Image (spheres, rainbow, N blue to C red):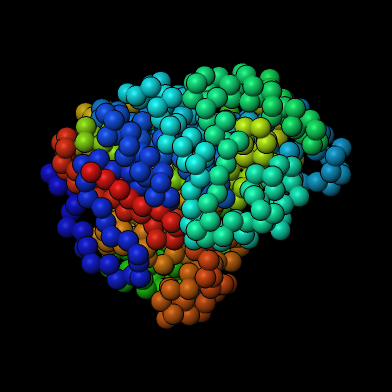
Amino acid sequence: MNFNFNFNFSNPYPTTRIPVMARNVCSTSHPLAAQAGLRMMWKGGNAVDAAIAAAAAMTICEPVSNGLGSDAFAIVWDGKELHGLNASGPAPASWTPDYFRRKYGSDAKKPPVRGFDSVTVPGAVAGWVALSERFGKLPFADLLEPAIEIAERGYLLPVVVQQKWRDATPELSSLPGWAQSFLPWGRAPEVGELFQFKAAARGLRAIAQSRGEAFYGGEIAQAVEKFAAANGGSITARDFAGFKPEWVKPIGRDYRGYTLHEIPPNGQGIAALMALGILEKFDLSGMPVDGPDAQHLQIEAMKLAFADVYKFVAERQAMEVTTAQLLDDGYLASRARMIDLKKAQDFGAGNPVKGGTIYLTAADENGMMVSFIQSNYMGFGSGCVEPEFGISLQNRGHGFSLEPGPNQVAPGKRPFHTIIPAFLSRPKAGSRSVAGQERGGEGLTVRDIEPVMSFGVMGGNMQPQGHMQTLVRMLDYRQSPQAACDAPRWRFNAGMSLNVEEQMNKTTVQALIDRGHQLEVINDSYQDFGAGQFIWRAGDTKTKGYIAASDSRRDGLAAGF
């Protein structure tokens, strides 16, 4: 069986990329990270080893998006079974609504955007260790060697990263440790200038030598606690020591004979599943791919999904409804009936109750495929950088609410998360619905499914929107992964507000305005429309190979051998 299913490899969109076809591949948003992943596979490692090496390198090569203080999620096809990993960290033990209101006023609605009171426990490093222990072949210390070398020797700054670095400087330069780490000459580096991050090299060495213990129970945790206390924060080494990532069963939704898998809440991946469940009620393939009808339907489906996600999705234990209720066929059909093909609407949440960055992917010739994402949330995260070990800390805590509800802040609780890896499969002939098995809580194995694609699209709430838009292009319109990457995108914000890319068809843009969409045309793809990495399996047995794509909106590379 061939999973290319007659892709149209002609690409009608402007791009600097071509598909990469190889037996072992790694696709990331920075070329040095992709090469770090390949280096591990050349040494005899597998796709998990490659993904960890690439992720570590990305903390150095794209600090505008992630760092050693990030969270992470992964979906792994180990050749026999599908696994999910939630490596998102919790709130410090001191965090309550009263903690924030005492500091920021009784009318505060959320934790702050920047500073130490936005910093939750970083989970990415623990995620690397967990992946390595369960699936890796090479010694853990080997996986961090490329990142250590890049941090120590430096790298020449690429175009897109430099733009975001420069733009962040006015807001972040006064935050603790940021200028010391990221303004080496009192300014942002220019394109082509050598940036070295020797403090992060020390941090990576300590992590490598201790298999992460230095980060969660040793010198790094102590250094972060000391740095936080000196700068108004309350996170402690004890908060770090209590953290463990969680292995989870992915949730899924069938679409056009395939199944999209996402990590369950506290993440927003369920939004993509809900939107696809709504879209399945329409014949998109009978509409022009870049025409107003197809785009309008996708926008409205996404708005309906977000209306529910923003009301109901949080850490699973705090949710008032279950994922099964949100993905129920009858409920999604009722939501689909609310769409008016000729009119944009501002939808509220429904009632599903009966009686919730950098992305990279790697795949190897033995069939292992890894979908991996890690992020500091908003560019450079909290803006706080522990100076001894170069720990650039996330601002995930801003995702909490101080108001009563499922996402209200509490000690040890994980916030609503935006970063979501994705995986596409299809059921083997004769097996029952894969998504139905997931909703029933059963494991998914090689007996049930055939792996098809590991993929993701970075960028805040753009992520489920990107999952949906690119999958529709591939599955409804047979566009290749690279063309689906390069095609113009829209981004729903709130209410009736949308951003659309400058290269979107002008007739389509006007038709969407005529239907009531409030559009702003944007020429900043990094910030507003995300960027994807895709690996599509090109055969049904070992060594057949893959088709890889890397989004031209970033400095990335799909590389293979």
* In this view, 301 is above or below 155: below
- Residue 225 locus on image (x, y percent): 72, 27
State the count of labels: 0
Q: Nearer the viewer, residue 161 or 190?
A: 190
Tell me what residue is drawn at x 80 percent, y 46 percent: 108
- Residue 96 locus on image (x, y percent): 76, 32
- Given the current orientation, which residue lies at the most extreme left position? 1
* In this view, 224 is above or below 166: above
For residue 386, side relative to residue 306 (left or right):
right
Is residue 560 at least partly visible in the picture?
A: yes
Is residue 466 at least partly visible in the picture?
A: no
- Residue 219 locus on image (x, y percent): 64, 21
Q: Nearer the viewer, residue 514 or 372?
A: 372
Q: Quadrant of the N terminus?
A: top left
- Residue 223 locus on image (x, y percent): 69, 27
Q: Quadrant of residue 430?
A: top left
Q: Nearer the viewer, residue 287 or 61?
A: 61
Q: Quadrant of the C terminus?
A: top left
Tell me what residue is drawn at x 72 percent, y 52 percent: 173
Tell me what residue is drawn at x 62 percent, y 40 percent: 392
